[in-house]
Image: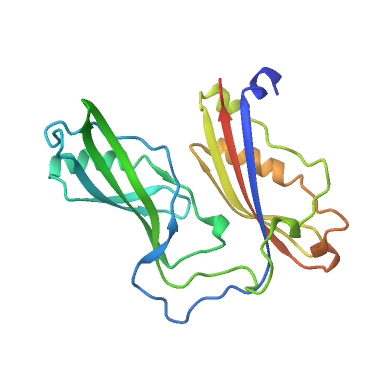
Amino acid sequence: MNSSIARLVRLSLVLIAFVCGDASSAAEPDRELTLRGPAQIYGLVIPDFPVDSVSPGKPLEIHIRLSVTEGGLVQDASIEPTPEPLKQVIKRTLMKWFVLPDVCQNSKWTSAEVRASMVFSIEEGRQLVTVKNPEWYASGATERYADPSAPTATSTVAFKEPRDIATYPRKAYLSRLNNGIVVGVIKFGPDGSKEILSIYSWPSPIFAEEVRHTLLHWELHPDDANLKAQQAVLVCFKFSFENSH
C-alpha cells in the first residue's frame, strides 16, 4: 500500500469480549417498543431548510421514526407533524442515513426502530438544524449470546502480538471515500478457529473487506484463558477509518 495514503488515516478499535452461551429470550416477546439506549447516526445528511415554515423565535420541531435493517440502513421513515410536500423532502434525506448496528451491546431484538427529533430554527440570523436524542426503541426480549454470569471485559481475551492492523483501503481512497466504519462479531472456537458471525460497514463494503482480511489473521495467544479452557469466545469489534487529507 502507498505509504503516503496510510499517513492520512486515523484508526480506532474497540473490542468487547464475552463467553459463548445459549441465547436467552422470553417465551412471549413484548410487542410494545421500549427505550433501549442511544443510537449513533452516520451519513447525517441534513435536508434543505424549510424557509416558509420557520421564523425567528418560532422553530419547527419534527419527530422522526426510522425503520432500520439489521445492517443499519434506513428502509422507511415517518415524520410528524409535517406538511406533505416538506415531509417527502425530509424523508428522502433520512433514507441516506446509516444507524450503527448495536452489535457491541450483545443484543438482538424482535423488532426495533430509531426515534429522534429534528429542530429547524433561526437564531441571530443563522439557519440552524439540530438532530436531538437519537435513541433505539425495541420490542421483545434481549437475546444474549453470553452467559449472563460471565465477565464481559476486553481483558478476558489475549491475542498473539503483533496483530495485523487494518489499513485504509486503496479502493476507498481512489473512490474518494474520506471515512468509514465497520462493526461486527467474530467467534474464536475452543480450538482457536475463527468465524466472523456478523460484519456491517458504511458507506461501502470496501471497508468490511479490509477488516475481514485483517481479523482472519488474528490468533489467540497460547496463554489465553479461553483457549486453555477450550471455551469459545465472541469478540465485538469496531473499526473507524478516517482520511484526514
Front residue of 14/204: it is 14
Whole-percent x and y of residue 132? 33, 46
Observer able to see residue 191: yes
Against 215, is 191 above or below? below
The chosen color scheme is rainbow
Q: Residue at x 13, y 37 (%)?
A: 53
Does residue 169 show up? Answer: no
> For the view shown, which residue lies furthest in the top direction?
4
Residue lying at 50% horizontally and 64% vertically, measured from the top left: 108
Q: Give the residue furthest to the right.
A: 222
* Residue 219 placement (x, y as % from top left): 80, 50
| Tag count | 0
| Residue 189: quadrant of the picture | bottom right
Seen in the picture, residue 168 relative to 42 is either above or below; the reply is above
Residue 236 x/y as whole percent? 63, 54
In this rendering, position of residue 146 left or right of residue 125: right
Whether residue 119 sits left or right of residue 38 in the image: it is left
The quadrant of the rendering that contains the C terminus is top right
Left or right of 121 in this view: 132 = right
Q: Residue at x 15, y 33 (%)?
A: 56
